[in-house]
Image (cartoon, grey):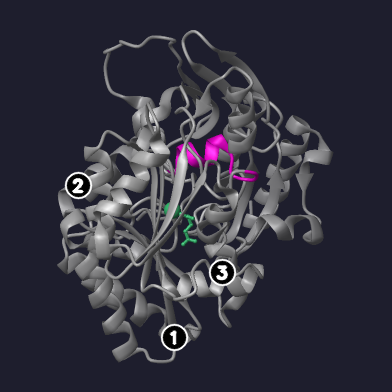
Amino acid sequence: MTTAQRHTAALAALADIVGPAHVLTDPDLVAGYETDWTGRWHGHAAAVVRPGSTSEVAAVLAACTRHRLPVVPQGGNTGLVGGSVPMDGELVLSLRRLSEVTEVDPVARTLAAGAGVTVAQAQRAARDHGLDFGIDLASRDTATLGGIVSTNAGGVRMIRYGNTRAQVLGVEAVLADGRVLTRWKQLTKDNVGYDLPGLLTGAEGTLAVLTKVLMKLVIPGDATQVALVGIDRVDDALTLLGAASRTGLVLEAAELMTAAGVDLVARHTATGRPFTHAAPFYLLVEVSGPGDIESRLLGVLDDAGSLVLDATIASGPADKLWRYREAHTEAVAASSRTPVVKLDLSTPHRSIGRFIDDLTAGLSDRFPQLRVICFGHVADGNVHVNLLDVPAASQERVTEFVFDLVTRYDGSISAEHGIGRAKARWIELSRSPVDIDVMRDIRTALDPAGLLNPHVLF
Ligand code: 2HG
Ligand code: ZN
């Protein structure tokens, strides 16, 4: 059988499983699944299949194995490393129809949901029971639970509740050959064997396809206060956060921005600039805690003296202040003349300030034509380096320059976005040869034919 005949037979088998209406081949319908929203990652899909149940996912994967058709699992397609877009004729397996929150257990504080449930949907379901979902990120209305678990997403609440892996209690997932793996126990203590949910979390769809997840929920903090603070240096942010923690305030979020980023957002969103005089850096901090947190937060800012160039505070959720931070991704995308080169890095805490200074100086020296906007989760040592106006011909050199610097700082080339297609060829900068061998062995054991998301990770 030729490849074309094999594909035709595979698509017919898929239509038998999910119904012809859920196998998309019309180029206009498929186009939205073939590219990510940054416009940087795209490719060509054989088709898009949209199963509506675990058993359909299982039958789809068994058929793909029989017909040797590679598969790219896709949730909300909000990832930033090209991990959910096809490259060259794979089948896109969309999990979005698995969109039901099946149970919220307010006693155990868990949420059971299909992989296609969005983060915002999970947040609403949790809040209906006086609880909250421990992950929050700007793409909450589109990002799915299957997607954030597959990529072990971070987000703005990681400082408080940890990353996605810390929220995963159980999974149901389909292996490449169609077997369904269920590790799903409502138990706080259950120490039997390998941590398979932990392994599938962050596997970027290379080991199995998640169909259901059992997530922990959190008890939300009391009322919060949010401060936007102008500062001279990145290290001043760490000093302020340390001082706030020492007074017993609980850090709910701590985000860093630069003058250039805030200025861009102010222009893009047509909101005013936060302060009369721009500061080199801005810290957005949200705190909770017992007692009068407003006066305690004001006390921290007062005690910091001249370290605080300017500041404004508001009661949470303080959407107007958060907008300066949350609109960064869309503002850079709208402003850049080329698809933005996004590098999500982390460094040890003590060196994050020096790293950002070296990076900014090095880039303007070597690549004067591009613009750099850094922002991110400063208390996690996580910097989102966004590079604007980078001609296609220099994307690789710029990426290598940044990765070389972060490696010299003993940092990571991916703090929270994963590796995807974007960083696959540089994975050895952050993992040793033996580490990579072990990961490859695990991948081969679970997916011997290499059909699941073949272009990501290695
Ligand atoms: C965020 O923190 C996301 O807002 C996106 O991780 C970061 O756009 C980016 O570079
Ligand atoms: Zn982030």
Q: Does 449 sit left or right of 106 as displayed?
A: left
Q: Quadrant of residue 17?
A: top right
Q: Position of residue 333 (x, y in %)?
A: 58, 70
Q: Which mark is residue 370?
A: 1
Q: Is mark 1 within 8 Å of ligand 1?
A: no
Most extreme residue toward the right is: 21
Mark 3 secondary-structure assignment: helix
Mark 2 secondary-structure assignment: helix
Find the magenta span and give its range. 141-151
Residue at (72, 60) in percent of width and height: 31
Residue at (38, 78) in percent of width and height: 396
| C-alpha span from label 2 to label 1 | 35 Å
* Of marks 2 and 3, the one in the foreground: 3
The residue indicated by pointer 2 is 435
Q: Position of residue 110 (x, y in %)?
A: 50, 17
Amino acid marked by disc 1: Leu
The residue indicated by pointer 3 is 265
Determine contact: label 2, label 3, CB under 8 Å.
no
| C-alpha span from label 2 to label 3 | 40 Å
Q: Nearer the viewer, residue 29 or 148?
A: 148
